[in-house]
Image: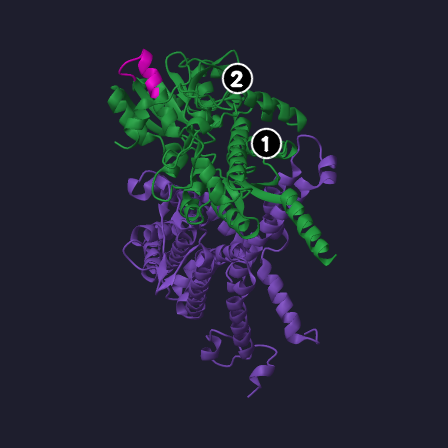
Chain colours: A purple, B green
Amino acid sequence: MRNPWAQTGNYRTSYVQDTTIFANYREIVSVVLLLVALCILPMFLERSQVLVLNFILIYIIAVLGLNITTGYAGLISVGQAAFMGVGAYTVALSAPSLPFWLTVPLGGFAAAIIGFIVGIPSLRVKHLYLALATLAFQEIFVWVVGRSPALAQGAAIPVEMRNFLGLEISFRNHNYFWYYVILFVLVLVVIAWRNLLRGKYGRALIAVRDNDRAADAMGMDPGRTKLMAFALGAFYGGVAGGLLAYMQRAVVVEEFTLGRSVALLAMAIVGGLGTVVGSILGPAFIEFLRLYVERLSEWMKSNAFIQSITPAGVDVASALLPLSFGLVIVLFLVFEPRGLYNWWRLVRSYFRTWPFKY
Amino acid sequence: MKRAMVLATVALLGLAMAQGRTVNLLWSGAVTGPTSDVGGPYGAGIEDYCRYANEQKLIPNITLNCSVRDDQYQNPITQRIFEEALDRAKPAMYLGYSTGAMLQLKPLINEVKMPTLPASAHIGLIEPPNNQYMFLPVSSYSEQVVALMEYINRTSKNAKIALVVNPSPFGRAVVDHARRAAQRLGQSIVDVREVGGGNLDNTALLRALDAAGVEFIIHQNVAGPVANILKDAKRLGLDKKIKQMGAVYTGGADLIRLAGDAAEGYLWASSYYTLDENTPGISLQKQLAAKYNRSADILNSTNYTAGMLAAAIAVEAMRRAALRFNGRVDNETVYQALIGMNGPNAFKPGFAVSTKSGIEIDFTRSEQTGAEGLRVLEARGGKFVPVTEPFTSTLFRQVRNP
């Protein structure tokens, strides 16, 4: 047998090997090291920096869900923010009487049920028509919340958790506490994601995406597979929404509008559709881009020279942020449709075979 | 010799501390993104007033570090900006912006005891829970709408009214209070419609309201959607039949610029003085706009006045805190100064109208609205002119907590 630590590729010789969660030992070590790094990272960060990480981790969970629906099953969804909203409002309503470790999965299940229902049109329509159906759901969600007194008509519903197993949660440790909770949930959902996709259900998703008639002819049930893809994607969205509700201390409908759904889709595209690594890189890239462009914009505003060369009445600094977002998405679609994941793959391949080219 | 050196060092340090103390003031709002037509001038007003406060040394021995940040109308960015400020340069006061973000931040603001003056005048911000540190610079949207209903009642009994509101918590804030007020005034709210931006054709809306016998439309929105409805009403010949009016963010120079002559006759509830009035605040506004090269659009915007008023209240609270607490200006002392801003200590910067008792801006621990006086203004000849004396809505106080 080859030395498992000296592998330069995947030499799978059996179906069992083909369905392992980790391809080799190096992958396991990398993941463990990454997790250790993520666990100690907040020790070196300010509260507000941890808040940024929390948002990224939550968006990663939502994008993972979107990647099941859109990336793996090929069902375009522009309603992921609404699924997050279903999870968040479920948490907001159940938080006064249930602990968070029950409300968050409950939010996921509520979103999954709604996802199953929203997925029904996918049995009949495809592509842009399906995107329109999910768009309709997104708008219906906002409309329903806006007209529901029980949901404060979209205004804030407080979601506060002051104590966990004797640990007092206040402003000082709020972001840190939720960082570790979100990280733990993220690890669970990533494992579940990998576990799902290595099995027959995952393969069915890919088969249905590539050709649903062929998949049907081979004994798979495309209808059930599509509904399952919607329900699972929505479950991830619901969990992300539930965590967001706790982290932001209140639920407001403005967090779950079409703009957020489009942003999540952009994160999935920039990261690379249908991959775990892409689901992580996409939200991180977009959020850090936002942060640094914001800094650049503020620097431009305060720089006298830049202001002096800018035509009067033109606020280039303020326009920088929306401009950069649009540009990044267009550039990725044109030049790197496989997203950041492809760059990651190239870098990894280079180091795996180094010092050899192949 | 040694003792003299120590004394000199201590004296120098004391002098440096006395001269170089910096106090932070934070504003985050929509300079870009949705509602930036309001946020841009509002932020500019804060920025200019801060520069003026530093130049004039309004707060003794203290330099004001005014941070004006663009949150793009996105709640997570507002939260990040606020928490970043708490980590790096804790503000003595926070000037907030949007309804959604402020409602969401309420628990955190209460926990960190940060006196906050939001641009949003949503009544929910000063309602319990977590409302202790929230203060509205001017009367709430709900009060403005109820005041308009009282104004209608002066000339038209049992009026049929439709509410046209923004499809958001900002817009919906007024609906319940308006219904309760209508009940007391014998008016009927015939319809409540939600209209947001992009309402390029409002024929169906106006025809439906006309068919329902609506005599008055009250808007709770921003100027853009209202301007489109006014233009369509004129096109359909309904401008004389249905009288339209609205709360503070619906009107002003922005509405006239967008709606043109279709705005004629529009009634607007506002606490702010107009640019044509000669008050200390408005004179200062003109002076600062000229000094800092602001465009005519910004100078004419009521939101520029609103931003200046918010900054003026903050600076005044800091000044009073510095005097009262021996130069200690932080969130706690500013809060104390703010709730002490009443009675003979009320603040009168001249940006907003005063109540009958001559008070412009006052706050107490339980009364968290600054300018309680407001007027109804009418668009005439391309500008808004007051058609009432300043008043406070007595009915609103009855319907607020029935």
Residue B359 numbered tag: none
| Residue B122 drawn at (x, y percent) | 40, 34
- The quarter of the picture where residue A344 lies is bottom right
- Chain letter of disc 2 in the image: B
**Which residue, given by chain and number where applicable, does mark 2 sit on?**
B260
Tag 2 near tag 1, CB within 8 Å? no
Q: Amino acid at mark 1?
A: Tyr
- Nearer the observer, disc 2 or disc 1? 1
Q: Residue A127 lies in magenta, yes or no? A: no
Whether residue A69 sits left or right of residue A34 in the image: it is left
- Depth check: give the residue in front, B175 or B371: B371
Q: Which residues are magenta?
A: B149-159
Q: Which residue is mark 1?
A: B49
Q: In the rendered view, does B178 fall on the left or right side of B86?
A: left
The residue drawn where x is 39% and y is 14% is: B238
In magenta segment, residue B151: yes
- Up-down: is B39 above or below B109? above
Tell me the SS state at disc 1.
helix
- The picture places residue A294, in percent across and down from the top left corner, at 60, 46
Residue A83 picture location, percent across and down: 39, 51
Q: Which residue is pictured at 53% across the width and 65% down the height?
A: A43
